[in-house]
Amino acid sequence: MIVDDRTHRDAFAKFRNPRSTKVGYHIGDELGLCQCEFKWFDSVGDLIHHVLNVELPSFAYDQDDQDNFRRRIARALRWVAVEGLSEEARADLNQVDWGCTMYWWGSLEDLLSGKTQFSREVLGSFAVKRGGGSGVMAVEIPAFVEFLRCCCKSDGGPGKAPSSDNSPPYTRH
Ligand SMILES: [Zn+2]
């Protein structure tokens, strides 16, 4: 896949509205060199394809590294198309030391449910930002979706640097 096509696909995955997609993930590199972002897909198959063919080539420049990581990532993800985006598979994926961490994956509903530590942090940060109690009402979902686009940027977002509105970082990742 050529670089421009990768960039285009990546931009598209970030731009999509999670309300009209099935699954997404929140990924970043461990050193914080690149922005940690949400990306959204129509299917688990598309998500796997994006990890292997868009994320991996951007992190592993060396072809031998890439081949090695590709095998290990594919092995970690071998059941998710059938069994879903489990926490076990995410832990397996994060055992691969390709420099990139999958902090969360699932559907928008999963994120809203607050079942994982990560989703609780996101919901908590959103609650602080809008100055209310926990939980996201249906009418607030568009605002929540907007919040997800900028909640964890390395360029001065609340996760990485002091922010003007005193939002605490939700990111302990
Ligand atoms: Zn993040």
Image (cartoon, rainbow, N blue to C red):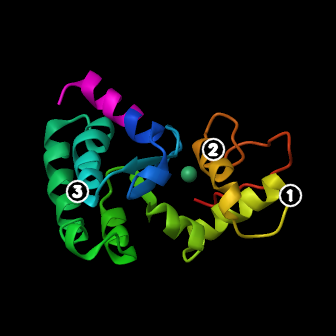
Q: Secondary structure at mark 3?
A: helix
Residue 69 rendering spot, x and y as whole percentages = 21, 52
Residue 131 located within the stretch drawn in magenta: no
Residue receiving disc 2: 146
How many labels sit on residues?
3
Query: The residue under label 1 is which amino acid type?
Result: Gly
Most common secondary structure along the magenta stretch: helix
Residue placed farthest to the top in the image?
A: 4
Left or right placement of residue 108 versus residue 172 in this view:
left
Q: Residues within 10 Å of mark 3 (few under 14, many from 20)?
A: few
Q: Residues within 10 Å of mark 2 (few under 14, many from 20)?
A: few
Residue 32 rendering spot, x and y as whole percentages = 53, 43
Q: Which mark is residue 131?
A: 1
Residue receiving disc 3: 45
Label 2 vs 1, first from the N-terminus: 1
State how far apart marks 2 and 1 are (Cα): 16 Å
Closest to the observer, 63 or 44: 44
Label 3 vs 1, first from the N-terminus: 3
State how far apart marks 3 and 2 are (Cα): 25 Å
Q: Secondary structure at mark 1?
A: loop
Q: Residues within 10 Å of mark 1 (few under 14, many from 20)?
A: few
Q: Which residues are magenta?
A: 1-11
Residue 82 rendering spot, x and y as whole percentages = 20, 73
Label 3 vs 2, first from the N-terminus: 3
